Image (cartoon, rainbow, N blue to C red):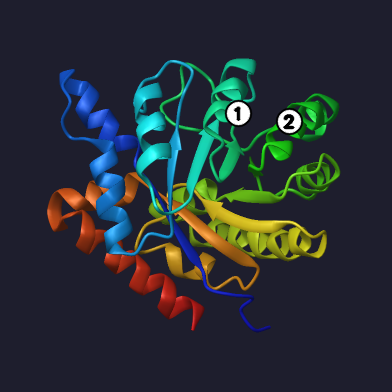
Amino acid sequence: MQPLGKLRLGVNIDHVATVRNARGSAYPDPVRAAQLAEEAGADGITAHLREDRRHISDEDIARLAETLTVPLNFEMAATEEMQAIALRHRPHAVCLVPEKREERTTEGGLEVAREENKLAHFIAPLADAGCRVSIFIAADRRQIEAAARIGAAVVELHTGAYCDFHAEGKSEERDAELERMREMASFAHSLGLEVHAGHGLTYDTVQPVAAFPEVMELNIGHFLIGEAIFLGLKPAIARMRELMDEARS
């Protein structure tokens, strides 16, 4: 199968804000990081405004919406508060993610099938406002079918389990998870959904996922911000872009 188009890279800048907030100062500025990411070849910027505001702030979202020249992917929980913020700023994309206060990061995909009616009503005004609605889910047929039924434009497949198996040296489990993601990417595409992927991807794990022809965008953050400590943000992003392009070709 031939690739369906250029593979886009969305850079998540949440953890620039994490470092900033550790000192309670204005530095480092996640908006500056977003601008540098654009210059390095990012096709979009992802930012997750959590309910507890542990990293990205409301002001960050407002500044990103005002200054970015590439699309903003606004990650958020499916709450009335976040819906109102999204409707105020009308970002290019809204990605609904599960959120628990005690978790360190998003631990799994959104449960769509059990909340189908609620989520269908929740995303309707976002879509009407011109936001592309994405649902962050596990590579699971039931969740993908539900995402299609509620009218989502995009599903983002959670790559965390695959990356964890790789880090733990569990090659059999890693390969099985990779094959499951491959099958579900194809299935989601067959339903008319645009397919994205992300969570935990590194230089060592990105290429097998980038090679899926149905995947149109990868969203990567924590690893790139970590590598920026050693390489600088632009070189870290440029290397990821290079590996993605190699896999796609």
On screen, residue 211 above or below 231: below
Q: Which part of the image, by quadrant, shows the N terminus?
A: bottom right
Residue 65: image location, x then y, percent: 43, 38
Residue lying at 81% horizontally and 47% vertically, measured from the top left: 148
Residue kind at label 1, given as amino acid type:
Leu
Question: Dividing the picture into quarters, in which one does residue 53 lie?
Answer: top left
Q: In the picture provided, is 232 more to the left or to the right than 39? A: left
Q: Which of pointers 1 and 2 lies earlier in the amino acid sequence?
A: 1
Residue lying at 52% horizontally and 32% vertically, measured from the top left: 89
Residue 83: image location, x then y, percent: 62, 24
Q: In the picture provided, is 32 more to the left or to the right than 92? A: left
Q: Mark 1 points at which residue?
A: 87
Question: Dividing the picture into quarters, in which one does residue 40 lie?
Answer: bottom left
Q: Mark 2 points at which residue?
A: 125
Residue lying at 66% horizontally and 34% vertically, measured from the top left: 110
Q: Nearer the viewer, residue 88 or 199?
A: 88
Residue lying at 67% horizontally and 49% vertically, measured from the top left: 155
Residue 54: image location, x then y, percent: 36, 21
Q: How many labels does the image show?
A: 2
- Circles 1 and 2 in contact, beta carbons < 8 Å: yes
For the residue labelled by badge 2, is the local secondary structure a helix, a strand or a loop?
A: helix
Decide: few, some or many residues near mark 2? Use Cα within 10 Å; few <14, some 14-19, many ≥20.
some
Cα–Cα span, label 1 and label 2 = 8 Å
